[in-house]
Image (cartoon, rainbow, N blue to C red):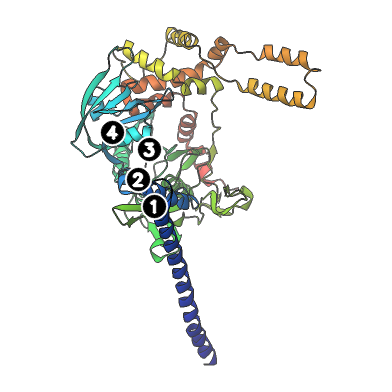
Amino acid sequence: MKKLHILFLFVLLGMPAMAQNNSDRNFEIGKNLDTFSSIVKELDLFYVDTLDTKKMVRRGIDYMLNSLDPYTVYYSEDDMDDLKMMTTGKYAGIGSVIRLYQKDKVVISEPYANSPAARAGLKAGDILLQIDDTDLTGKTTNDVSSMLRGEPQTSFVLKVKRPGVEKPMSFKITRETIQTPAVPYYGIVSSNVGYINFSGFTENCSKDIRKAVIELKNQGAKGLVFDLRNNGGGLLSEAVEIVNLFIPKGKLVLKTQGKTKQAMSEYSTKKEPLDENIPLVVLVNDNTASSSEIMAGTLQDYDRGVIVGSRTYGKGLVQSVRELPYNSSMKLTTSKYYIPSGRCVQAIDYKNRDGLGRATRIADSLTHVFHTEAGREVRDGGGIRPDVEVKVDTVANITAYLAVDDVVFDYATEYYQKHPGLESVAKFKLTDEDYAAFCQKVKDSEFKYDKQTESALQSLKKIAEFEGYLNAAKEEFEALEKKLNHDIDFDLQQNREEIEQMLSDEIIKRFFYQAGAVEQSLKYDTNLEKAIEILNDEVKYKEILSKKE
């Protein structure tokens, strides 16, 4: 009884302390907000120059949020379309990818199939000159993108410069609601393996995945490959729905843990699965993040599929959208998620920063061991580690420069203009004559690029000169410079295979849009080759999913 009195007394004494702490915290918040408001008013009244207070306050908000994590973002009324696009995959516009071209122009990179842009006649390579009466000279891609978007059924006139056409061309385009495809491509990639390319967890994407799975099975697929490479995630609820296609009803998918009661949740499968036996392989890379990691990690934790590729990004944080005054919103991190084994895959520690204020990556030595349902070892922190790792392909220096300097893009535009059509993606292949024409274009354009070996040699020469060794090693340096001298013909032939792949991808995109580009890239995909190999070897597949460290 005495213990009960002591506990009751402790509670009574503790309540005023807790109330005092909350009161002190509220006072500090109010004081700082008043100070900020006063500073803005004083600057607006007395600063020597007239200030754009809207822009100034926005910078203050962005700087404050940047000190947290990159996923906590403020969206003003003008930015709400971006937020809607992120969660639903929908926006009102012309349905085209644009990008910077030749460092100071904006160009159509890829119109979507059957979009207003494609139906109006816009082509990849068209340089954007004017929207109605607004000159686009000097505009950024963000500026132009905002102008191309608007209310559905509103129209504008777009003036472009098309390569090979002397005079500018004008197109009247009506904006429509554009739905970016969550599943750009799916199909049978070997005799009995189905492949699904999955770009984002947008609203209702689980229905598209379900449809693709059913159609592939009807076409004879006995195993499935899910390609989550470069899939940055999206809606958590859609990840749960997709996992439920292959995991029995009543299984935990993830838990979220945060500061508030609303942030503490459990998500489990609620339906009977579509197919809980079909073998699965999930392709991942370092840009596989968030909901993609929930899907891949949950399938791994239940030993339901083999993960192939390279370690994922490591985003174990969950965001919620909070409405703010004046039709604005904030997307903010409210919790961390934990997949069935109990691990959180978050790789970056945004709370504990280094001396320069930089967020640091959690060291592998500080991660913890967890276990899958079958007892296989898995670890937290640092993303999802694949069950089968495939070495990441590197790109030669010359290939990267050919892409960055728009040489590949320009050649694809010329090729498209000279060829009325292609029979199919499967039958397309660049000929020796095509590649020779490309090489000639490269040389005619006086294309130049930095070789890493030459850059390293120049750095070494500067160090040798600083330390007084340059004169003594002069002959050796001259001999090495001759050996490392640019030989563009040699480099174009030495790296022909990967340059041709990049050229082919860009050309196919002109004729068969996004789906065609995905199909073309699968022709030389080493990750897909490994996935097919695993799915075609039942013993190996089962061995991977049961192997304990």
Q: Do the CB atoms of the residues marked 1 and 4 lie less than 8 Å apart?
A: no
Dot in front, 1 or 4: 1
Q: Position of residue 481 (x, y in %)?
A: 68, 14
Three-letter amino acid code at disc 3?
A: Ser
Dot in front, 3 or 1: 1
CA–CA distance in space, label 3 to label 2: 22 Å
CA–CA distance in space, label 1 to label 4: 33 Å
CA–CA distance in space, label 4 to label 2: 43 Å
The numbered disc on residue 148 is 4
User: Does 452 appear above or below 39?
Assistant: above
Q: Secondary structure at mark 2?
A: loop
Q: Secondary structure at mark 1?
A: helix
Is any atom of residue 87 visible in this view? no
Which comes sooner in the sequence, label 1 or label 4?
A: 1
Report which residue position mark 1 lands on: 44
Left or right, 245 with reference to 536: left
Three-letter amino acid code at disc 2?
A: Asp
Residue at 45% across, 77% down: 19
Report which residue position mark 3 lands on: 199
Q: Nearer the viewer, residue 133 or 261?
A: 133
Report the residue that reaches farthest toward the left: 153
Which comes sooner in the sequence, label 3 or label 1?
A: 1
Three-letter amino acid code at disc 4?
A: Leu
Q: Position of residue 418 (x, y in %)?
A: 33, 10
Q: Nearer the viewer, residue 136 or 20?
A: 136
User: Does 403 appear above or below 34?
Assistant: above
